[in-house]
Image (cartoon, rainbow, N blue to C red):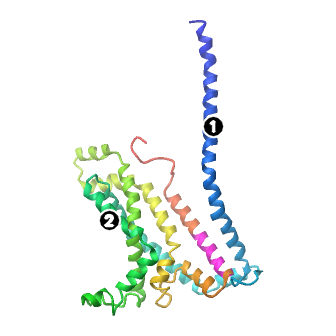
Amino acid sequence: MTALAPAALQSAPASSASAGGGSGIRERSLTWMALPALLMFVAFGVIPLIGVLVLSFTTWDGIGEIRPSGLTSWKAVLTDPGLPHALWVTFLVMALTWIVQTPMSILLGAFLAGQQRYRELLAVLYFIPLLLSSAALAITYKALLDPNFGLGAGLHLPFLAQDWLGRPYLAVGVVIFVVSWQFIPFHALIYQGGVRQIPVTMYEAALIDGAGRVRQFFSITLPQLKYTIITSSTLMVVGSLTFFDLIFVLTAGGPGDATRVLALSMYITGFQANLMGPASAIACILVLVGLALALLLRRLGGDATSSQLEGA
């Protein structure tokens, strides 16, 4: 025994060094695994962003020579009276789509988290809108809502035969509806995964205490979905800044400029007015707004390193 004791003591540092070596190998492996994604992000995210930032300090019509012009493009954009309106419409669409999508996605996700087979079938059906092109959806709804040849005229329903895309408030409502209809399935899928991660023992304990389904939903499901809500909200808010194709095909920013969001304003400035400098400045503003909102939501989420799940 006395002869073995020193050997055991000597093996402790050796095993510790072995564990440290294994940790180092694991870290190096993770670095190599993350490297392709990092290269892709730099190639398709960082470098184009730097190019857009440089273009915002130039004058270019998209074909001719690119000429440095200092802050001319930024001054033109920041003094344009259309910028505050475009920002207002962008935040209006962002807020209303979040208000519609979040509660419906949570309820739908909680419903689909059940193990019944008919719910799995419904989940597949609910997911179909997300598979369709935004431009195709816009063309379809534009035809269906046509006051002369659309659904209202065909079914002889006066309520549906309104000029949905010709009145400002109705047009904004149609945009909110179509965006929500398309993206609620995606966020419901996120919430479905979040609900399934909640330990069943929590619901069993609540059931023993006499809590009904409504009480369980508000006392267990919603608090446990805190970080899922933050993730889904970040995707909704930042994603709403990129709404372009659907609005461009559906309303083209009209009637007037009632649905002219910032992304659409950037396209019109760059590719219809051939002012690439101001369009690049608008793109930079979009990036800054998106980063600020993402950071704000992350702050609201608190410490993301701690888990809300029982036992985690």
- Tell me where residue 153 sits by quadrant: bottom left
Instruction: In this rendered view, identify the residue nearer to me: 63 or 157.
Output: 63
Q: Specify whether 245 is left or right of 202.
A: right
Q: Element at badge 1?
A: helix
Task: Give how far across and how far down residue 302 sits, in percent.
Answer: 50, 54
Q: Main secondary structure of the magenta part?
A: helix
**Location of the N terminus (image quadrant):** top right
- Front residue of 228 and 155: 155
Determine the residue positioned at 33% across, 65% down: 126
Name the secondary structure under disc 2. Answer: helix
Range shown magenta: 277-289
Q: Which residue is mark 2?
A: 125
33 above or below 159? above
Tell me whether the residue at label 2 lies in contact with that at label 1, contact meaning CB atoms closer than 8 angstroms: no
Q: CA distance from mark 2 to mark 1?
A: 45 Å
Q: Residue furthest top?
A: 2
Q: Quadrant of residue 166?
A: bottom left
The residue mark sitting in front, 2 or 1, is: 2
In the image, residue 300 lies in the stretch drawn in magenta: no
Residue at left 52%, top 58%? 298
Q: Residue 48: horizontal and vertical position, in percent? A: 66, 68
In this rendering, the answer to whether 152 lies above or below 18 is: below
- Amino acid type of the residue that numbered disc 1 sits on in the rendered structure: Ile
- Percent across and percent down for residue 50 are 69, 68
2 or 1: tag closer to the N-terminus: 1
Query: Could one spot residue 103 in this view of the protein?
Result: no
Residue 35 at x, y = what percent?
Answer: 64, 51
Using the image, tell me which numbered label, if any, was put on residue 25. 1
Please tell me the numbered disc located at residue 211: none
Residue type at tag 2: Leu
Q: Quadrant of residue 83?
A: bottom right
Quick one: 77 or 40, which is closer to the camera? 40
